Image (cartoon, rainbow, N blue to C red):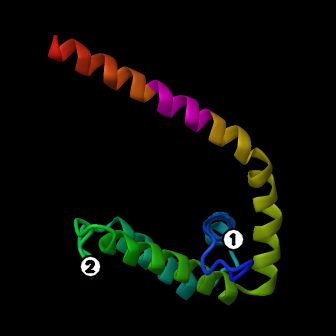
Amino acid sequence: MIKAGRVFQFWPLIKLVRENAIILFYAWRHPQTPHYLKGILAAVVVYLLSPIDIVPDYLPFVGIADDAALFTGAMIYLTNLLPASVLTDSRRQSEKWRRRMPYIMGVIAVAAVAWIVIVVMVVRKLIQ
């Protein structure tokens, strides 16, 4: 992570999180994944979606930073704990998803722009 005088690079971290998230999704569905790993993964997801946090999310930056750190750390830890056969199968399956990712992100971007346009139009109608 330290390169060319930078202490923190944002995009490599995002890429690492995206790749590990896809691998863990396929590992969750794999029959040879140990149950305790599935339990830890479920606990992390429940914690992230839960309104009860160690540091409340309404605190600026700090509330979301603890969730991001927990999520990133848990994903790297769980990916390293996966058995070798499950990890290779999950990586192979995730390659298909990574090839489709640019198209999916394009569709999400178009949908987001359309949603914003609709919201702006509705708000303008309500104001007038």
Occupied quadrant, residue 66: bottom left
* Residue at x-position 63% and y-position 71%: 9
* Residue at x-position 58% and y-position 78%: 75
Residue 4: x %, y % from top left: 74, 77
Residue 80: x %, y % from top left: 68, 87
User: In the image, is residue 101 part of the stretch drawn in magenta?
Assistant: no
User: In the image, is residue 112 part of the stretch drawn in magenta?
Assistant: yes
Residue contact at pointers 1 and 2, CB within 8 angstroms = no
Magenta span: helix, strand or loop, mainly? helix
Residue 24: x %, y % from top left: 63, 71
* Quadrant assignment for the C terminus: top left
* Residue at x-position 35% and y-position 65%: 49
Q: In whole angstroms, how far apart are the C-alphas of marks 1 and 2?
A: 33 Å
Sooner in the amino-acid sequence: mark 1 or mark 2: 1
Disc 2 residue type (three-letter): Val
Residue 116: x %, y % from top left: 40, 29
Residue position marked by numbered label 1 in the rendering? 30
User: In the rendered view, does 98 fall on the left or right side of 111?
Assistant: right
The range drawn in magenta is 107-114
| 83 shown above or below 12 | below
| 10 shown above or below 113 | below
Residue position marked by numbered label 2 in the rendering? 55
User: In the rendered view, does 12 fall on the left or right side of 75?
Assistant: right
* Quadrant assignment for the N terminus: bottom right
User: Which of labels 1 and 2 is toward the front?
Assistant: 2
Of residues 8 and 22, the one drawn nearer to the viewer in this rendering: 8
**Element under label 1?**
loop
Within 10 angstroms of label 1, few (less than 14), some, or many (20 or more) residues? some
Disc 1 residue type (three-letter): His
Occupied quadrant, residue 30: bottom right
**Element under label 2?**
loop
